[in-house]
Image (tube, rainbow, N blue to C red):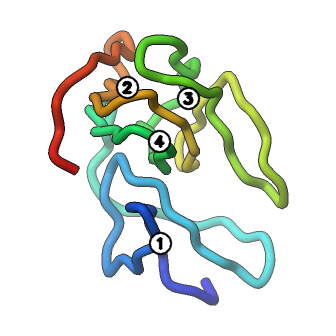
Amino acid sequence: AVSDAFYYDGGYISADSLEAGKGYWIKYDNADYVYLYGLSVSSLSIPLIEGWNLIGVIDHDIPAPKGGILSSDFFGYDGSYYSTDTLRAGKGYWVKSNSNGILNLGGGSVYKNKSLNP
């Protein structure tokens, strides 16, 4: 990588380590494979805030959830933004929420409204 890893929380913030459920921007000089070490995550509850969220996903591909508090498609980035109907392991995605809540990935991918203090 030629940059730090950045997550989004109303602005981009440099991260010292990567957390499950967060999406990150990382700049590379050219395409490469990156190996991540840690525990496998087959399900995950991701807090969403109203507005745009950059999220990470679980350890296997799943259909992108729709409806509920989600007010947009999921968008990945590969030189330009693209809409996707499949969330792929190891990728990060932008999604817009119409309120604070929880996005549950794995085990049914259920999402629900929940009061959060972001």
Q: Earlier in the sequence, mark 2 or mark 3?
A: 3
The answer to whether the residue labelled 1 contacts the one labelled 3, judged by CB atoms less than 8 Å apart, is no
Q: Residue at x 67, y 40 (%)?
A: 75
> At numbered mark 1, what does the secondary structure look like: helix, strand or loop?
strand
Residue 14: give x, y in percent of width and height: 41, 80
Q: CA distance from mark 1 to mark 4?
A: 15 Å
Q: Nearer the viewer, residue 93 or 63?
A: 93
Residue 101: percent from the left, percent from the top? 28, 29
Question: In this figure, which residue is indicated by the disc labeled 1?
Answer: 12
Residue matched to label 3: 61
Residue ID at (58%, 48%) = 91
Which of the two marks, 2 or 1, is nearer to us in this view?
1
Q: Which residue is mark 4?
A: 51
User: Where is mark 2, residue-wise?
Assistant: 105
Judged from the image, the secondary structure of the residue bearing numbered disc 3 is loop
Q: Amino acid at mark 1?
A: Tyr
x, y (%) of residue 8?
A: 45, 62
Callout 2: helix, strand or loop?
strand
Earlier-in-chain disc, 3 versus 4: 4
Of badges 1 and 3, the one in the foreground is: 1
Point out the tag, 4 or 2, that comes first from the N-terminus. Answer: 4
Question: Is 100 above or below relative to 10?
Answer: above
* Residue 42, picture quadrant: top left
Image depth: mark 3 or mark 4 in front: 4
Query: What crowding class fits label 3: few (fewer than 14 Cα within 10 Å), some (14-19), or many (20 or more)?
Result: some
Q: Position of residue 23 (x, y in %)?
A: 47, 55
Q: Amino acid at mark 3?
A: Asp
Out of 40 and 20, give the one closest to the viewer.
20
